[in-house]
Amino acid sequence: MAVLEETTTYFKTTVGKNLSDEEAVQQLNELSSSHQEAITKCLKGRKEEIRHALVESISAISSAQLQDFDWQLKLALSSDKISMLQMPLLNLDLDVKENGEIKPVSVEMNKEELQNLINALEAANKHLIGSDLVVEHASVEFIIVFKSVYVYL
């Protein structure tokens, strides 16, 4: 049972930290060369499947997942209190999947609120990069999109 646990931990760590082949083999230095070769062969053959399984297990921690998003820039020309407003607004539509059901969520933000969102996303992304798991690049792309939107506001 200990061998299974150690092997599982090795695969998770090696794939999660995205170790090079040399670094991965160095962690197996206590094993015989035939065992090292067998484990390395398994790792190379199943690396993407292991990565996908790790991402799925991390994603399963939260019941809500972002499926898609759309955004629009709007210019508020006036309000009930101010006749000449001319304030740019971002309308963000999110499709969030929760418990197998997709729910639409709409948010309207001004420039300051968008900057706060960008800062929060960047902080979350830094935390993910600092973790042992390499996550798909969707969060980085999401931040880049909102930074480019911010320029227009």
Image (cartoon, grey):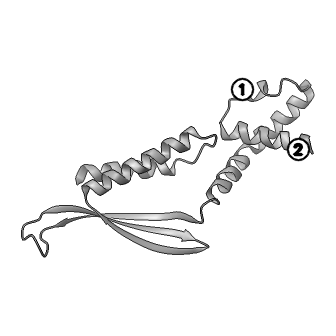
Q: Residue 31: percent from the left, percent from the top?
A: 89, 27
Sequence order check, earlier mark of 1 and 2: 2
Give me the disc on residue 74.
Answer: none
How many marks the image carries: the answer is 2
Which picture quadrant has residue 90? bottom left
Residue 40 vertical placement versus 128 (above, below): above
For badge 1, the amino acid type reads Glu
Q: Look at 12% across and 70% down and name the residue there.
A: 78
Q: Is residue 32 above or below residue 16?
A: above
- SS of the residue at dot 2? helix
Between 23 and 47, which is closer to the camera in this rendering? Answer: 23
Q: Residue at x 91, y 31 (%)?
A: 35
User: Residue 33's x, y, as percent?
Assistant: 90, 24
Quadrant (top left, top right, bottom left, bottom right) of the N terminus: top right
Looking at the rendered structure, which numbered label has been put on residue 4?
A: 2
Q: Residues within 10 Å of mark 1 (few under 14, many from 20)?
A: few
SS of the residue under disc 1: helix
- Residue 143 in picture, x, y percent from top left: 41, 49
In the rendered view, does 54 fall on the left or right side of 42?
left
Residue 23: image tag: 1
Residue 135 locus on image (x, y percent): 58, 47
Q: Name which residue lies at 49% across and 75% down.
A: 103
Give the spatial CA distance, label 1 vs label 2.
Answer: 21 Å
Residue located at (26% from left, 54% from top): 112
Q: Quadrant of residue 65?
A: bottom right
| Left or right of residue 23: residue 74 | left
Position of 57 compared to 7: left or right? left
Give the amino acid at mark 2. Leu
